[in-house]
Image: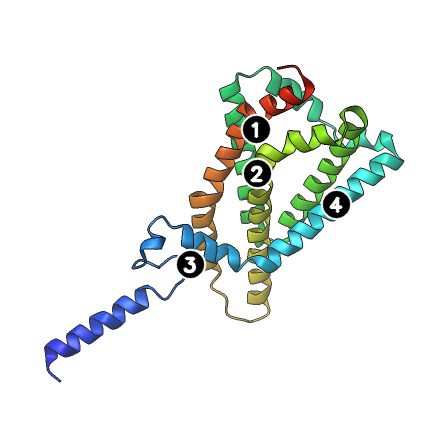
């Protein structure tokens, strides 16, 4: 075998090595040009963590709903501070509201991921607290406006927003698990996993949260208005 053939073989091997990482290195596949396949592969690997946070979110929501039903006065504690926040939002222009919702969700979701390095506890608390509050609000609103009102008030933007928030929390749980594995003496590329998570967050989760904020600001109120007859 001559040197030219050897060099060609080495170059082909190097090219194959560059595409070994299915999450971020699928450079040769046209379907991956937008990076969406990378995100899909990464999220597919999060199924156990996503399942965990979804179950916790649902259970905490149910707990918030029924505890408030049994003890309505408890809602004052759960929703403490929200009235001032609502007043602040009501004083904003629509564009300011959209940006406020976006940055609020984006920052909290990012923190749920990053602070997952503390053994995954923070994202779990984040999911439980948000699920509980949603349960409280669901009960209060259902008593006043009915479940259809709640459904229409959450569905347009929530179908995007909630999955993005829960995926961020699941990413944080994964980071916590990796830290625990490392402390147990197992090799884990924590830095590499963190970089992958950050990449997915800024490439996929943040744009989707921006879209959800736009829908929540400009479309959800219209849906509610049509349902209540105020539009």
Where is residue 116? Give x, y as percent.
58, 51
3D distance between C-alphas at marks 2 and 1:
9 Å
Q: Is residue 230 left or right of residue 66?
A: left
On screen, residue 132 above or below 152 = below
Mark closer to the chain start, 2 or 1: 2
Mark nearest the camera among 1 and 4 is 1
Say which label, 3 or 4, has the lower sequence index: 3
Q: Nearer the viewer, mark 4 or mark 2?
A: 2
As drawn, 116 above or below 230: below
The secondary structure type at the circle numbered 3 is loop
- Residue 119 shows in this picture: no
In the image, 101 versus 218, the foreground residue is 218
Q: In this view, which residue lies farthest toward the bottom? A: 1
At 53% from the left edge and 34% from the top edge, which residue is drawn? 212
Q: Which residue is mark 4?
A: 60
Which image quarter is the C terminus in?
Answer: top right
Mark carried by residue 161: 2
Q: Mark 1 vs mark 4: which is more N-terminal?
A: 4
The quadrant in which the N terminus is found is: bottom left
Q: Distance of mark 3 from mark 4, alpha carbons? A: 32 Å
- Is mark 1 in CB contact (under 8 Å) with mark 4? no
* Dot placed on the residue nearer the N-terminal end, 1 or 3: 3
Q: Are marks 3 and 4 in contact (CB under 8 Å)?
A: no
**Number of numbered tags placed on the structure image:** 4
Comparing marks 1 and 3, which lies closer to the viewer? 1
Q: Which residue is mark 3?
A: 23
Q: Which residue is mark 1?
A: 216
Q: Position of residue 24 (x, y in %)?
A: 39, 57
Q: Which of these two is toward me, 149 or 165?
A: 149
Query: In the displayed structure, does residue 178 sit left or right of residue 64?
Result: left
């Amino acid at each position: 075998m001559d040197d030219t053939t050897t060099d060609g073989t080495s170059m082909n091997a190097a090219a194959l090595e560059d595409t070994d990482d299915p999450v971020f290195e699928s450079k040769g596949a046209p379907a991956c040009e937008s990076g969406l396949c990378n995100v899909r592969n990464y999220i597919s690997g999060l199924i156990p963590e996503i399942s965990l946070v979804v179950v916790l979110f649902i259970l905490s929501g149910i707990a918030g709903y029924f505890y408030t039903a049994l003890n309505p006065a408890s809602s004052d504690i759960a929703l403490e501070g929200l009235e001032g926040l609502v007043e602040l939002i009501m004083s904003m222009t629509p564009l300011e509201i959209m940006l406020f919702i976006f940055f609020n969700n984006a920052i909290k979701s990012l923190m749920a991921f990053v602070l997952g390095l503390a053994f995954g506890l923070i994202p779990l608390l984040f999911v439980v607290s948000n699920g509980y509050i949603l349960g409280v609000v669901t009960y209060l609103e259902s008593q006043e406006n009915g479940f259809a009102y709640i459904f229409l008030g959450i569905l347009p933007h929530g179908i995007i927003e909630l999955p993005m928030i829960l995926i961020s929390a699941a990413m944080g749980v994964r980071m916590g698990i990796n830290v625990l594995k490392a402390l147990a003496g197992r090799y884990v590329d924590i830095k590499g996993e963190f970089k992958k998570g950050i990449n997915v967050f800024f490439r996929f989760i943040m744009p989707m949260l921006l879209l959800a904020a736009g829908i929540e600001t400009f479309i959800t109120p219209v849906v509610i208005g049509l349902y209540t007859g105020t539009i």
